[in-house]
Image (cartoon, rainbow, N blue to C red):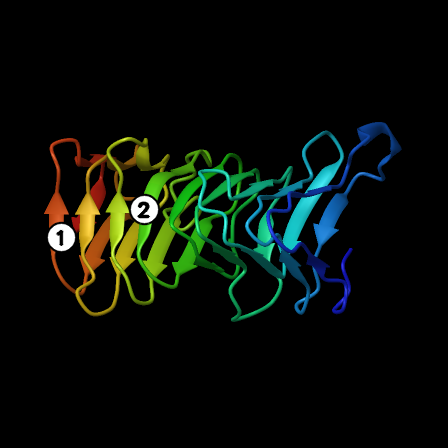
Amino acid sequence: AFGANGDVTGTGDVTVNVTANANASNGDGSDDIVMNAGTVIDAGSGTITLSTAGANGGSIALGQLTTANATTTAVTLTSNAAVTDNNAGTNNVTAGGRLVVDAVSGVGSADALETAVASIDIDNSTSGNILITEADAITVIRLASAVADDDDGTTGQINLGTTNGGITVDVTGTGVTAVDGNIILDANGTNSDLTVNQVVQTTNPTAGGVVSIGLSADDSIAFGANGDVTGTGDVTVNV
């Protein structure tokens, strides 16, 4: 755990690796990484990696992660449970490059993660939601929820909104996909476009359930050749 004054600071190009559950056999069953609301991990221009992977791994509770690194692995979070917002309204992740998250039980599920990053690649496997509030323009490589079908669009949902910038679902990625969760992509701010160049897809195997895809932008919405929007079963699509 990191206290309010427990900042980790690297000047220049510093690699920061934080690993809980390093030896699963020595853990107590919930080996978490917990940052206080005021804690800052600043890698300068280096990469940041936080991991609780493994049998006894727990959640990652974020304060502030900051790096000028502009690579596709600028910030990598691997959690055997959830990734949560532990600092209220302050940015959880600020990076010049990509935020990569692999979680099991939600990413900002109860309180959206606040980010200021160039791109995102996020996968959530078992329970919870993916909720992201991005400060400016962002490119989506992957937003994937594999939470099992339960006839409830509010579980396993994906919600990405910007405060002041466009959203691009990149053709080189795998798009935005859920099993039966609602999907919302919402680009806010002056001249903020939504560009869909890869699939946006969810399903609703049971007729009568409420599952929806909502796409909105304060400026234009454009669909590329691969930017299919697909609802399998009884799915409401609003553009």
Q: Is residue 188 left or right of residue 42?
A: left
Q: Position of residue 62 (x, y in %)?
A: 62, 57
The residue lying at 52 percent from left, 56 percent from top is 93
Q: Position of residue 153 (x, y in %)?
A: 36, 47
Q: Position of residue 143 (x, y in %)?
A: 38, 40
The residue lying at 41 percent from left, 44 percent from top is 120
Question: Is residue 139 among what the camera can see?
Answer: yes
State which mark lies toward you, 2 or 1.
2
Q: Is residue 196 left or right of residue 78?
A: left
Few, some or many C-alpha atoms within 10 Å of disc 1 (few <14, some 14-19, many ≥20)?
some
Few, some or many C-alpha atoms within 10 Å of disc 2 (few <14, some 14-19, many ≥20)?
some
Give 110 or 27, whichever is nearer the viewer: 27
Looking at the rendered structure, the kind of residue marked 1 is Ile
Residue 78 figure quarter: top right
Q: Is residue 70 left or right of residue 15?
A: left
Looking at the rendered structure, the kind of residue marked 2 is Thr
Q: State which tag comes first along the sequence, 2 or 1.
A: 2
The residue wearing badge 2 is: 139
Residue 18 figure quarter: top right
* Distance from the alpha carbon under mark 2 to that under mark 1: 14 Å
SS at mark 2 in the image = strand
The single residue placed furthest to the front in the displayed view is 12
The residue wearing badge 1 is: 221
Q: Position of residue 90 (x, y in %)?
A: 53, 69
